[in-house]
Image: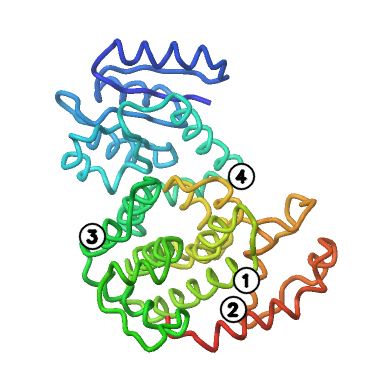
Amino acid sequence: MKVLFVDDERRVLVGIERMLFGLNRDWEILLATSGAEALAVLEQGSIDVVVTDMRMPGMDGAELLRQVRQRSPATMRMLLSGHTETQAAMRALDVAQQFLSKPCDPQVLVDTIEGAVALRNLLADPEIGNTVGRMATLPAAPHVFAKLNQALQDPNCDARQIGAILAEDPAMTAKVLHMANSAFFPSAGRAVTDLKAAVQRIGSTMIRNLVLAAEVFSQDASRPDVAELQKQALLTSVLATRLAGGRTDADMIGIAALLANVGRLLPQPEGALAERFGYAEVGAYLLGVWGLPMAIVEAVAHHTHPQRGSPREFGMAGVVHVAVALIAGEQPDHDYLKRMQVADRLDDWQAKADAIKENDNV
């Protein structure tokens, strides 16, 4: 694998090279001290991943990645940005497929790059990578979700802080208040009218999933099927989380179920490609580009055919497969369920799905 690092400070590049050498990664490391030099390297042969600093003289990181997208759309594009560069980094939202904080923890850097490679191995057809990589407008990465997810990782984060993030988007505020007062969350006769109380009632996991759904499914709201796709996605996420029970990966299962059909949002002509290759596979590639965990990406990629890869247990892809099918009014793969020794639970799962759909005022 070829990885190109770009930074105008040579000492930074030397430090990255030494760090990766110490981790004994079988990568071909290429270095460039300017955007122009990076593009010259790109002209000499294919590059798997470009990781660039944002603030550089002449051509900055955003402009470099824009040109990389144009010249080599299948190349993964990553931006290193410091906290003081937030406003500048906003210009890169449509070209940087993943953002890394600066300074970046070495293991985070390695995991992010290797995750991109694992995604390419999972979905190896270059036409998929070229198509998703070339898209400029839809779907954009869910940035409010990323901001919220970062806040939730802070042990000192409380409902007031989460509410403040949500309040930045009036439409999101309305959606959260609507759900807090829905049949999913019995209110004992008390209506919820402020965001802090709504967050406390719904819980951080559901808030996060609701934000993710609102961002992802609102990007092409003019399409008549988007509202129904969003509703089905939320119901599927609720069901999958309940089917996951006390599993340690229940949160990730809920997100994977929420995004299982994200590939159906692609516009034409990308939508035609998604139909040919499979909505699940193309959607999974997009999620990988956004930087979601590989466990979620793999579950989305395999949920239509959960037996793919010869699973030894009823894993994340299996739970998502069942939830997607039951909310859509279809039957899961019974042979697969028998092989996983969970077919006897189908009636109970169906009852849960029916109960959720009866309260579908999401």
Q: Amino acid at mark 2?
A: Ile
Real-space Cα separation, disc 4 to disc 1, in angstroms: 23 Å
Looking at marks 3 and 2 on the same chain, the residue that comes earlier in the sequence is marked by 3
Q: Amino acid at mark 3?
A: Ala
Q: Nearer the viewer, residue 4 or 179?
A: 179
Residue 243 falls left or right of residue 150: right
Residue that mark 3 sits on:
164
- The part of the image, by quadrant, that contains residue 100 is top left
Real-space Cα separation, disc 1 to disc 3, in angstroms: 32 Å
Give the structural element (helix, strand or loop) at label 2.
helix
Looking at marks 4 and 2 on the same chain, the residue that comes earlier in the sequence is marked by 4
Residue that mark 4 sits on:
122
Write the residue at 36% across / 35% down: 78
In this rendering, which labeled residue sits more in front, label 3 or label 2?
3
Instruction: Give coordinates of residue 63: x percent, y percent.
Output: 22, 36
Q: Amino acid at mark 4?
A: Leu
Real-space Cα separation, disc 1 to disc 2, in angstroms: 6 Å
Real-space Cα separation, disc 4 to disc 2, in angstroms: 27 Å
Residue that mark 1 sits on:
323
Position of 354 relative to 254 (above/below): below
Q: Are marks 4 and 2 in contact (CB under 8 Å)?
A: no
In this rendering, which labeled residue sits more in front, label 1 or label 3?
3
Give the structural element (helix, strand or loop) at label 1.
helix
Write the residue at 33% across / 69% down: 218
Real-space Cα separation, disc 3 to disc 2, in angstroms: 33 Å
Q: Residues within 10 Å of mark 2 (few under 14, many from 20)?
A: many
Instruction: Give coordinates of residue 270: x percent, y percent.
Output: 44, 60
